[in-house]
Image: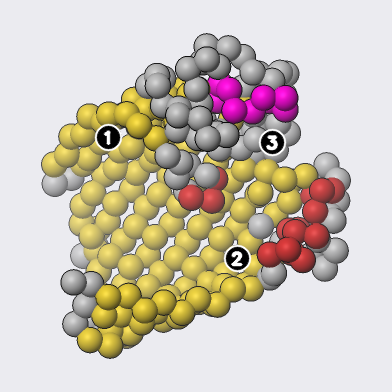
Amino acid sequence: QQYIGTATNASGFALVTSNENFFANISKWGATSGQGQAGGRALTSNYVRAALTGDVAGFDSAIGFQSWSGTSASDSVAYGTVVNAVAQPWGLYDTKAFAIDAQIEGDVGDMPLLIIASYAKAPASSSTGGNVNLFNSSSVFDKSSFNIGAELGIVRNVATVQLAYRKALSGIDGGTVGGTAGTNATDNAVMIGATYAIALNARLELTYSMYSGDLYSTTSNYANATGTSQTVLDLAFGF
């Protein structure tokens, strides 16, 4: 879901209920984004998160959805107005997106396995002079991402291997990044990784990501700025 930009600053309140087979979160919130404004002064955006949990064939499993809706103002003056998407994008925002996700976790033989999959989409902003969608400023193309990842513990509590795949539509016109004009530029990735517990509360993680799609073609000026691969080595400690 982070691909479509829903991990924004926010203020608000939530009502949460749960039991061993279900949980739900219903929130009223205001976005605190845009041009350094204070924001979040009216809780006119909505967020709903719900999921079913349980045992499926011996695996701890869950499936759920998320929905963002409503509008938010980035400052009190702009709130309640319809602001032009180009001339003043920091005024009144739509906050529209949805996501579905699922995961299973359990043992395959003596090895713990986790598989997570998700699909998220932020629709295009209004093309008729309405509000900008905070999660997707394009007035032409939706922004979406399908993701699946897995982690297998090859040595229990010591070492794991990871594999993940992303297939995304960026919401960017391909013509602006050196591709075909009038198409929603693709943004795909494959990640491989491994972790190793070098001591109690200390973990070493190495990941390598390879990017492909329209944003990373040989003619793409976006690829020239960001590169087509990334290697990350992380050493984490807990106390």
The residue where tag 1 is placed is 25
**Residue 239 x, y percent position in the rendering:** 18, 72
Under mark 3, the amino acid is Ser
Q: Is residue 43 left or right of residue 141?
A: left
Q: Is residue 212 left or right of residue 94?
A: right
Q: CA distance from mark 3 to mark 2?
A: 22 Å
The residue where tag 2 is placed is 189
**Residue 86 x, y percent position in the rendering:** 72, 27
Q: CA distance from mark 3 to mark 1?
A: 29 Å
Closer-to-camera residue (105/82): 82
Look at the picture and state if 175 lies above or below 59: above
- Identify the image quadrant of residue 32: top left
Sequence-earlier tag: 1 or 2: 1
Look at the picture and state if 211 lies above or below 203: above
Judged by depth in the image, the label closer to the viewer, 3 or 1, is 3
Q: Is residue 158 left or right of residue 216?
A: left
Look at the picture and state if 112 lies above or below 73: below
Q: Secondary structure at mark 2?
A: strand
The stretch of residues the image draws in magenta is 85-93
Tell me which residue sits at (13%, 46%) in the image: 20
Under mark 2, the amino acid is Ala
Check if residue 90 falls in the magenta segment. Answer: yes
